[in-house]
Image (cartoon, rainbow, N blue to C red):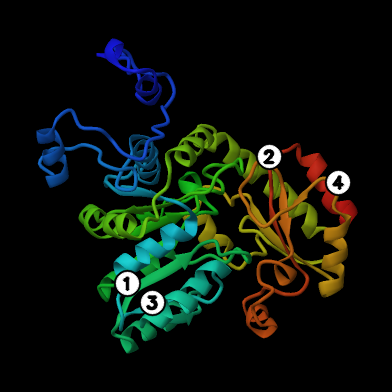
Amino acid sequence: MKKDLQFGSLCVHDFTKKINNHPHQLPIYATSSFAFENLEQGMDIFSGKKEGYLYSRYGNPTIETVADKIANLETFGLDIEAKCFLFSSGMAAISSLLMASVKSGDQILTQNNLYGGTTYFFQQILEPLGVETIFADFSNLENVKALLEKNKNIKMIYLESPANPTLACVDLQGVAVLAQSFDVKTAIDNTFCTPYLQQPFRFGIDFVIHSTTKFLNGHGNSISGAVIGRDIDFMLEKVWKVMKLIGTNSNAMDAWMLNNGMKTLELRMERHCKNADALAHFLQKNKKVAHVNYPSLESHPDYELAKKQMRGSGGMLSFELEGGFDSAVKFMERLQFCTIAPTLGDVDTLIVHPASMSHMNIPKAEREAVGITDGLIRVSVGIENVEDILRDVGEAI
């Protein structure tokens, strides 16, 4: 047929070649839609009678392959199955799960030391839609139980552990048991740990969320997010529907880059942990540092809990400088090797000053109440030679 076409038609149409063996690397299905062999096949796929792809907002082979890998990592060694969907960002993942889980009149119970973007979503998007957010101190589970008894419309408990940027940890098993007794679902942002360091399903959590932009990808070259759920029917019927109708899906290129990054996840996380532990102990000895937040330090209030829940303490830490805001600003200005950047989880060391950057719009009294002081510095410790990290941070202090 191709020989009968005109020049312009030849330019437009693809010359497909049947491949009898598989490609070594995951292909990028950079296509918005998928063609049908005939009308009957199209009708069968549209109706759900047969499996197949329609439109990349609904599903794409590259995206689904990477999502399946993440689901397998989160359930590795566990006798459970889970379903994962990839989204256009971590916030798209969070918003899609919550919009699939709550409605007007419902309540969300969460901790008071969350990532700022998540807090803003609760307050600025969900609350005007009639979903109330209740903030609590999750270090006291009796207090959490009292709130569940008092507020019968709580449908979701949303967690971060370790929290951003104070590295406070939550008793996941304790919360999960409590939530199940009140028929409340639980979700956790597991971005800091990745499934290599912490598997929330092991402790009974219902949903796991990642900003896959961060440690899972590890190279800062794409943005995406993930939701993994143990209730596969809920994921297919509710979460997928929100993703499809709002359009919060990932794309094939970002999924492919995420997959490339995950190939070295175990190796990177081991180095992140080793370097972060060295930096935490280095900082703890510096007289100009008031305290260090890192779970492997015995001085950390959640030291024992972290040992129980995590295989390692991760690549994130924070520390408070004596001298407050001015000392923190001077420290940031003196950095030569480490990078000042509002993200985390990359292979290079990234540093932010929350009071003047990520949390600048939060009233001082509110952020200080959860440990985000004027002198607090957050560090995403990279995989460089640790001597270079220690020298730069030490000289900047």
Residue type of the residue flagged with mark 3: Ile
Q: Which mark is residue 391?
A: 4
In the figure, residue 145 lies in which quadrant?
bottom left
Residue type of the residue flagged with mark 4: Arg
In the figure, residue 12 lies in which quadrant?
top left
Label 2: few (<14), some (14–19) or many (≥20) C-alpha neighbours in 10 Å: many
Report the residue marked by disc 1: 179
- Estimate the spatial distance between the alpha carbons at disc 2 and disc 3, rounded to whole Å: 37 Å
Label 1: few (<14), some (14–19) or many (≥20) C-alpha neighbours in 10 Å: many
Report the residue marked by disc 2: 383
Would you say residue 279 is visible in this rendering? Answer: yes
Earlier sequence position, callout 2 versus callout 1: 1
Q: Residue 157's x, y, as percent?
A: 38, 71
With 388 as the anchor, is 263 left or right in this view? left
Q: Residue 315's x, y, as percent?
A: 63, 49
Q: Secondary structure at mark 4?
A: helix
Q: Nearer the viewer, residue 151 or 297?
A: 151
Q: Secondary structure at mark 1?
A: helix
Report the residue marked by disc 3: 108
With 219 as the anchor, is 350 left or right in this view? right
Q: Residue 7's x, y, as percent?
A: 39, 18
Residue type of the residue flagged with mark 2: Ile
Q: Secondary structure at mark 2?
A: loop
Above or below residue 211? Residue 16 is above
Mark 2 and mark 1 in contact? Answer it, CB < 8 Å. no
